Every structure is written in structure tokens, then in C-alpha cells.
Amino acid sequence: MSFSNEIRDELCRLQRRRSCCDTAEAYGILAFANRFSADAIRISSEHEGFVRRARDLFLSVVGVEFEIVSGDRWRLELHDRDAIAKVFSYFGYDTEHHVTMHFHGWFVEEDCCMAAFLRGAFLCAGVCADPAKSYHLELSSPRGAFLREFLIRASELSFTLRLSRRQNGFMLYLKESEQIEDFLTYIGASAAAMRLMEQKVFKDYRNRINRRSNCEFSNIRRTIDAAEAQTEAILRLAERGELQDLPEALRNTADIRIAFPDLSLAELCDKFDPPVSKSCLNHRLRKLSALAKEKEEE
Ligand SMILES: [Zn+2]
């Protein structure tokens, strides 16, 4: 099941408690409905629970019964003109002069109602990406003017919804994990918010581990590459018979490098008797490499 529908499942399990919030939730659904016009109201969804909740909501708030139609998607429809007019007038609209749907702020004056309005909006038109993959939450609606007016009221919320135009309408969206968490908690999906938080902790932890092991890996790679280059230089000197003419310190260094090809510089230092310093060893190995190169370039 998609994360969006997990959220819907959780929201549909919420008890309806106050009539003011029922009205606000129904209003949120209407504002994000596929169609809200004088000849038809249509809400389409893949979530059966939501469609049933919405029908009950409109029945108890406005007293009209939408028809549920099943198919590829679930649809909640109203075609009866008188019933549509009743819905319009309940929410302060007029079927005779309906052009642009404006936002009626008096339905969301209380904080509980604002939360219910956004819950209705998410149930109807919300998409939330799986937090294991990315952070994105959006609410799409064909009603741009409505969304712009709504955003003025929504500026007091703890999350900042942004408006964007898309091909067939508009959307409000959130991109940051904390904002999405706040939104989900606010509309009553606290289990989903918790899952998002857990995913984030898990992802951060995994990234940290990956960064560390990448870093460790590249250190090991560097050590191996350096040891290989040094060994190669020493073998070239040996091949050309130049090794035995070198000072004892260099001969000794060459022997020990060949004897322990996997050791890092620091580890190699301990193989000397008496041990040598890292910078001294480094100096000698550079000298050997330089000598091997020198002769080749002549
Ligand atoms: Zn309320």
C-alpha cells in the first residue's frame, strides 16, 4: 500500500467528535474535489474508506446523500440540482452566480477546524511520497484563487505550504521532512508522522555509516596503491642490479618493504630494529622510487 493510503487509513479511523470540525472536513473535501459546479459534484479516489467517510460526512453535515460509484477508482457523485444547490448554499456559494470558488475563512476559524479542513483536503487530494525514498507532500486542486486566499489564512500554521501551478491546475506542497511531519501530526496522522521520523533517523544513520566506510575504504586503497608503487620501484632496482650498491639503510628498507607488502607506513616502521620514524621511512621509500625512476629517464 502507498504511504498516501496508509495516511488515509489512519485518518479514516479518527473518530468524528465535533460538528464544527465535520463541517470543516467536508469543506476541505469540496475545495479539493475534482468537480464542484452547479450541475455536478464529483470526488474521485482510489481509497474506499475515504469515499465512505465523505458520504457519511456530507449526509450528517448538509443532509444530502452522495452516490458511491465503484470502478477503476471510487467516485462520490451528486447530480441532483436541488441537492447540489443545498451543498452550495450550506458552504456560502450560489449555483446561479458560481464562477470562481472563493475561500470562506469562517469555516476554519478554530484551530481544530483548520486541522479538519486540511484533513479533508489530504483525504481527497493528498499525495505523500514514501519517506524511505523522498520528502514530498502535495494537495492538488483545480481552484487557484481559492488556494491563494487559503494560504493567507494558512500563514499562521507551523508549516509553510507553497503554491505551484501544474498542468491541470494547482497544488500546495511541502518538501522538508520536518514540515511534512508537522503537517501529518496536525491533521491527526501521528502514526504516519512517527514513521516518517523513524525513516529519517534510519536514513541519517545509514548515510553516516556509508560516509565512514567510504572514507575508510579510500584510506585502505591509498595505502595499497602506495605500497604497490614502492614495491615495483624496488623490484626494478633489483632487476637492474643496483640494489646491492645502495647504502645499507636503503637496502634494509627495500628488504623490509618487499617482506611486508601489505603494511601501511606506520606499521612498517615497527619492523625495523631499532624502529624508525614515519618521516624517515617515508624519506627512504621516496629515495628508492626516485632512484628507480632516475635511471629509466636517462
Ligand atoms: Zn472544530
Image (cartoon, rainbow, N blue to C red):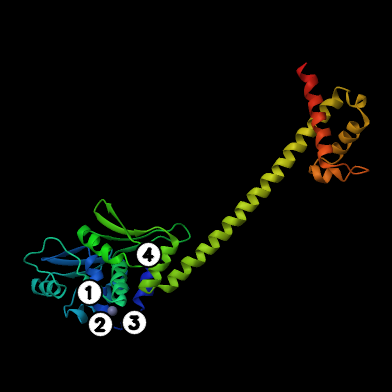
The residue beneath circle 2 is 19
Label 1 crowd (10 A; few <14 / some 14-19 / many >=20): some
Q: Tell me the quadrant of ligand 1.
A: bottom left
Pick the quarter of the image with the C terminus: top right
Q: How many marks?
A: 4
Of marks 2 and 1, the one in the foreground: 1
> Which residue is denoted by mark 3 in the rendering?
15
Cα–Cα gap, marks 2 and 3: 12 Å
Q: Cβ of disc 1 within 8 Å of ligand 1? A: no
Please give left or right for residue 237 compared with residue 133 in the image.
right
For mark 2, give the secondary structure.
helix
Q: Residue at x 30, y 74 (%)?
A: 116
Calculate the distance from the C-alpha at mark 3 to the C-alpha at mark 4.
24 Å
Look at label 3 and name its amino acid.
Gln
Q: What residue type is labelled 2?
A: Ser
Q: Which of marks 1 and 4 is nearer the N terminus?
A: 1
- Which of the two discs, 2 and 4, sits closer to the camera? 4
- Asked whether 207 or 72 is in front, the reply is 207
**Three-letter code, disc 4:** Phe
Specify whether 122 is left or right of 298. left
**Residue 278 vs residue 50, the one in the foreground:** 278
Q: How crowded is mark 4: few (under 14 residues within 10 Å), some or many (20 or more)?
A: some
How far across and down, in percent of the image, does residue 168 sit?
A: 24, 53
Q: Is mark 3 on a helix, strand or loop?
A: loop
Q: Earlier in the sequence, mark 1 or mark 3?
A: 3
The amino acid at mark 1 is Phe
Crowdedness near tag 3: few (<14), some (14–19) or many (≥20) residues, C-alpha within 10 Å: few
Dot 2 or dot 1: first in sequence order is: 2
- Residue linked to disc 1: 107
Residue 272 sits in quarter = top right
Q: For mark 4, what is the residue?
A: 159
